[in-house]
Amino acid sequence: MPDNARKNALMILNRLNSEQETLDNLVENVVMADRRDRALFNALVYGVLRWRAKLDWIIAHFSKTPPDKIDPQILNILRLGLFQILYLDRVPDSAAVNTAVEMAKPIAAIWTVRFVNGLLRNAIRHHKDVVYPDIDKNPIAALSVNKSFPEWLIRRWVERFGVEETETLCDAMNAVAPLTLRVNTLKTNREALITAVRDDVENAEITPYSPTGIFCHNLKKPISEMTAFENGWFQVQDEAAQLAVYLLDPRPGEKILDACAGLGGKTGTIAQLMNDHGMIAASDKDARKLSRLDAEMTRLGISIVKTSVRDLEKTPSLTEQFDRVLLDAPCSGLGVMRRNPDIKWAISKKNIKRYAQKQQVLLENAAGLVRAGGCLMYAVCSMESEETEAVMREFLNRHHEFKIKTDYPEIVRPFVNEPGYFRTFPHLHGTDGFFAVCLQKQN
């Protein structure tokens, strides 16, 4: 019978096809006691999503039925089996085929089960004979298949970066990102944190850019079971997100609004830079996220955060104004595909346009919450122009009272371009793709 790792991986892939849930939320709710099973489960889910287009190309080679005509559950079983055959050296090919067949039996007719068995065994023998698109003749199709990204996204990247840099960007997006922690400087320092987690990970090292970050490789236990986590010594946060908060430049004693606070990653960073002195209003339209944010601030020993449920897409009910407002806006998330490969297949060009429209509304409503002389910071984990420069141009054309800041702290200046935009890229900096800009409201 197929084991729990494979059955759970299939369940997640099937639910991603049919539900509007994110991969993070689905994976978080899967409980697996055995650490090796959990590692295989993660490898299968993230690996299939990362390499889905290439897997489908190979399936199309061996199947008379095109992948988009195959039953979605059977297609996911084929993807899981093929991924193990091609990418997991420690899994015997026979185990990959047999478990795929067993997963197909309860949901498919006998001829479909035979189809699964035959296709995977044929792939074992002949997968090296598969012909892929030629990068010289058709670079868009070649990169789309070989690097496993949707063609529409490859096309826009090639137009922007060229073929060679797009290939490098794809490789960076397909690399498994390290677990990145931000030390809670209210309780400890980076050196002490590295010492504290040394028994929980195979390797821990300092980040090259953020002064409070560390990379952790190959965890030996879940994060929530680490003593340093229980003691509130760190939050999980990519290096780009850590750095971006320095643009906001929060000061002790100020009144700050985190307008789309979510689970509180940047809220915690702001509180640290304020030395837990002042006031942070953390709002979000999701009460469940704010409940978790409250618990997170307690774990970190942060006392200055006040949460409130508010939907910033609607006219703000707040009458007060703030020294600084952070708008970490909902976005396509195309800058974090190395951590969330499901985004490759969930986002379309239409989604990007809808996000850009929403971002304009959020910016419009956030603008009135900034006091004269105060700052409004806009941030998205996207590299796409519609959500970044275009949003800024449109906003600044309407709001001449806001000007882009240029006197950023020294730590972020290497990432700021001529207009004053903070940008990071996976293939250039080894971080998530991130965009941020800080605007000052004129007196």
Image (cartoon, grey):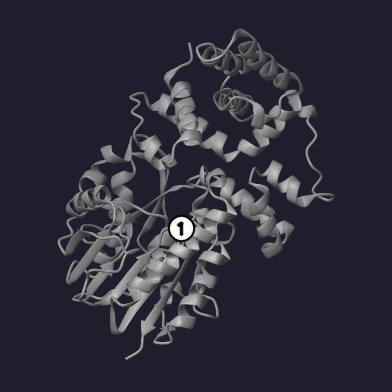
Q: Is residue 393 visible in the rendered structure shown here?
A: yes
**In the figure, is residue 263 to the left or right of 21?**
left
Q: Which residue is drawn at 50% across and 12% down?
A: 106
Q: Which residue is drawn at 83% across and 51% down?
A: 136
* Residue 44, position as x, y percentages in the image: 51, 30
Q: How many marks?
A: 1
Q: Residue at x 44, y 61 (%)?
A: 240
Quadrant housing residue 384: bottom right
**In the figure, is residue 54 to the left or right of 419?**
right
- Amino acid, disc 1: Cys
Residue 230 sits above or below residue 351 on the image: above
| Closer to us: 323 or 217 | 323
Q: Which secondary structure lies at badge 1?
A: loop
Q: Is residue 248 visible in the rendered structure shown here?
A: no
Location of mark 1 (residue)? 331
* Residue 164, position as x, y percentages in the image: 72, 57
Q: Which residue is drawn at 59% across and 57% down?
A: 427
